[in-house]
Amino acid sequence: MADIAMQLTIEAEADTVRDALTTETGVRGWFTADAEIGQGVGAEHTLSFPGVPESWRLRITESGERRLVLAGENGPWAGTTQTYEILDVPEGGVLLRFTHAGFPDQDDTYRNFTYGWATKFTALKSYAETGKPAPFFD
């Protein structure tokens, strides 16, 4: 199995970053403008993308103040798990630690998602720090 692991420092409060990951307004602010975001363990995140015929569904398997775990249910994320951890930085802001685990191989799909997450987290950082929505997929 292959995992994507990355982290970035965000000059924002932990609650701001959490809201960006766990609310409809938040996810629509940096990731995709067509998102339905459920709340609490067992709920579903449904993400739609331009030109993609089927929405991607993720099930919330863990949801805490500083940790979110999503399990891919269909599409290319089926069988994978995304873990977001929000850690305080002594100098201010937070460190977002991310792992997307369970890819069967380090193939082209894996490589495309590795690059994709890096670009999306640039959008997340900007949104959390400025509050200005600019979804990557609009």
Image (tube, rainbow, N blue to C red):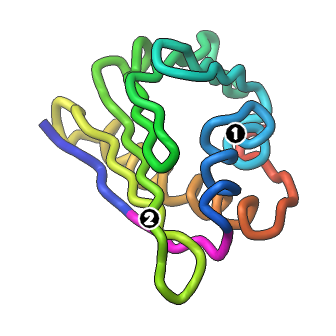
Kind of residue indicated by mark 1: Val
Kind of residue indicated by mark 2: Leu
x, y (%) of residue 88?
48, 71
Quadrant placement of the N terminus: top left
x, y (%) of residue 59?
46, 17
x, y (%) of residue 105?
16, 36
Is residue 103 left or right of 135 when viewed as pictured? left
Q: Residue furthest right?
A: 132
Label 2 environment density (alpha carbons within 10 Å; few <14, some 14–19, many ≥20): some
Is residue 61 left or right of 106 when viewed as pictured? right
**Residue tagged by mark 1?**
27
Quarter of the image where one finds residue 56: top right
Which region shows up in magenta? 7-12
Q: Residue furthest left?
A: 1
Residue 60 or 56: which is nearer the viewer?
60
Q: Residue furthest front?
A: 65
Rendered position, 87 above or below 17: below
x, y (%) of residue 127?
75, 59
**Residue tagged by mark 2?**
87
